[in-house]
Image (tube, rainbow, N blue to C red):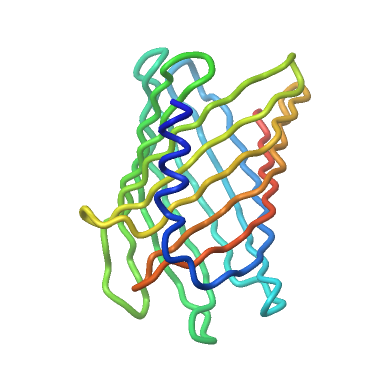
Amino acid sequence: MRILLILMMLLTMNNIKAQNFENWTTLNISGDINDKFGLVLEGEQRYNHENKEIRYFHFDAGAIYKINNKLSIGAYYRELYEIKNNDRVLEIRPHIDLFYNINDNFKIRVRNEYQIKEKSENVFRYRIRPTYIKMFNDNIGFLIQTEPFFVGFDLVRNRFNPSLCIKIKKFTIEPGYMLESNNKNSWSNIHIMWVNTKINF
């Protein structure tokens, strides 16, 4: 598993030209309706230091169905606003997630999303995110994850993210670093300080 994570990170390090720096903050609120169904709400904003502006915001609403102790499926609606070429554009992004818990430390999320774009062609995109979590006690641990993005068979993006994991009852905060590598004719990097906050009700 560790070798897989390292290979995926290194895969996106060839021909890196552009560098950028951002701060991302995410708030995820989730809770169970019953033993099988749960609800999820999420908001995220991304601040770009070079342009000194919030360049991106999204809002998610979704439901998760637990098939068994290892496998769950979720359906979501995402609406996002992003600055592109000095214009703020809207994108609607419905997606379906499959969650599989291999064991207590290792899980995988597979996302199939349809990008409905305001000023360009719509596209299907696939994302695979393996995550390794190691808790030192009930409150403190760390996680490491990578997430390649595919359009068809083409790798268009990868996100590599190590972070701390701090749990206090139903509240979790994951402050960490993310390297996002994007392939648009050539590879470019975004260096991100990310704080992911989760509340379970």
**Quadrant where the C terminus is found in the figure:** top right
- Point 42% across, 59% down: residue: 14
- Looking at the rendered image, the quarter that the N terminus falls into is top left
> As displayed, is residue 199 above or below residue 137?
below
Hey, which residue is sitting farthest front in the picture? 14
Q: Residue at x 48, y 66 (%)?
A: 16
- In the depicted structure, whether residue 13 falls above or below residue 3: below
Q: Nearer the viewer, residue 65 or 48?
A: 48
Q: Residue 131: x, y in percent?
A: 50, 31
Q: Residue furthest bottom?
A: 86
Looking at the image, how many numbered discs can be counted on the residues? 0
Q: Left or right: where does residue 31 sit relative to residue 166?
A: left
Q: Which quadrant of the view contains residue 97?
A: top left
**Residue under the point 46% across and 14% down:** 103
In terms of depth relative to the viewer, which is nearer, 110 or 158? 158
User: Is residue 22 depicted above or below 32 in this figure?
Assistant: below
